[in-house]
Image: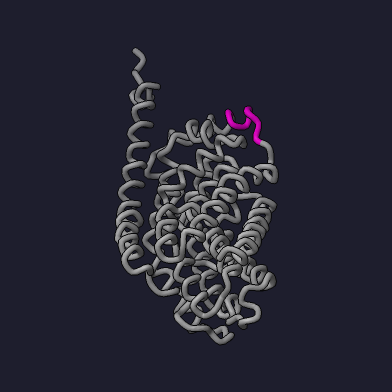
Amino acid sequence: MAQINSSVITPKQASKMTIVYTMIFLLIAIAGLAYVKWLPYYQKSILAATSHSIGTSILGDKPNLPSASWDNAWSYSLAYFNSVWKAAVLGILLGSLLQVLLPANWLLKVLGKTNFRSTAAAGIAALPGMMCTCCSAPIAVGLRKKNASVGSALAFWLGNPALNPATLIFMTFVLSWKFTMLRLVFGVILTFGISYLANRFAPTVETADINHFIKKAEKEGSQSFSIRWLKTMKSMILYIVPSYILSVLLMGAVRVWLFPHISEAAANSLMTVIIFAITGMLFVIPTAAEIPIIQTLMSFGLGGGPAAALLIVLPSISLPSMLLVWGSFPKKVLFFVAGAVVMLGVLSGIIGMFIL
């Protein structure tokens, strides 16, 4: 008499497991974001409303003389990682769990296409995250490993900092509503427009390829959850952490050259806007740190134009964040995004020269 194979999972059981896994992921994401982002930002919004400040600039409270040193690199890295480590850990955790808990077929149907709907869905999904691009990078990497389209993964990656609702609130209280409107307009263009256009620089994924990815993911899903998660976590930590630490150290070492003291004559010039758009695109900061940076630099005499450029480029991407996603996107896409961020920063700066 033939024995019944009890290890075979019926479609009904698989559907229940998918629902359970999805709920587990959502609960972890909600609890993590509430602890790392939502509750602290609620307190910071009260501080911004009452004191018109959210703290000191991570670049310091006085102009720096141009000298790169190990002390500069170390002190900046300590301040930076002390600010972001919880969000960074959460990003790695969610990026790894996303690959083993969320159903591949659902992700591919929603985020796997190159149309604007997939890009928009990912951009909207980024709003509750409120992470910097370094902390959201592991999640973007996870989306790409699950074969989300370039536009969708970029929209999530860029939307986290560019359209951070908490940062917009802080900005209104600390800087002005004009800064907030500039950030909102250019943030929407970057998150939804540039991300959608970036699909043109990526290989076309046909419907047959999507079906192949779904079948492949279903086959991988038959493995033990713990084995799949440990493999994913190991891969992420080995790839992300070393490059992250080294690149932040590099940015800390050269930061005094990236943001030099500007003379009164050049404080609101087009050349300064262009220079700050490029250097700000490369530099790495924690979430919302652009606000005290701009506030402090303007107190030194920086004009509205360069300040408006920094408003867009500082949070959008950085050299460390691009290194974190380097293996997950086509190189042409990342160069396109970097160039687009600089261009949008320059446009914002030109507008800022006249209205700020």
> Is 56 or 169 nearer to us in this picture?
169
Q: Position of residue 200 (x, y in %)?
A: 69, 42
Q: Which residues are magenta?
A: 205-211
Q: Splitting the image into 4 quarters, where does residue 88 fall?
A: bottom left
| Residue 161 as seen in the image, left or right of residue 334 | left
Q: Position of residue 19 (x, y in %)?
A: 35, 31
Please, what is the dominant secondary structure of the magenta stretch? Answer: helix
Residue at 68 percent of width and 37 percent of height: 204
Tell me if residue 356 comes above or below residue 12 in the rendering.
Answer: below
Residue 227 inside the magenta-drawn segment: no
Residue at 47 percent of width and 49 percent of height: 139
Residue at 51 percent of width and 50 percent of height: 159
Q: Position of residue 4 (x, y in %)?
A: 34, 18
Tell me if residue 215 comes above or below residue 254 in the rendering.
Answer: above
Residue at 44 percent of width and 61 percent of height: 171
- In the image as oriented, which residue stretches furthest toward the front? 355
> Is 329 or 236 nearer to us in this picture?
329
State the colouring used for the structure image.
Answer: one colour
The answer to whether residue 57 shows anywhere in this view is yes
Residue 210 inside the magenta-drawn segment: yes
Q: Splitting the image into 4 quarters, where does residue 167 fall?
A: bottom left
How many numbered badges does the structure rendering display?
A: 0
Tell me if residue 74 comes above or below residue 173 in the rendering.
Answer: below
Tell me if residue 183 comes above or below residue 194 in the rendering.
Answer: below
Q: Position of residue 51 (x, y in %)?
A: 33, 69
Quadrant for the N terminus, please.
Answer: top left
> Is 75 or 5 nearer to us in this picture?
75
The answer to whether residue 218 shows anywhere in this view is no
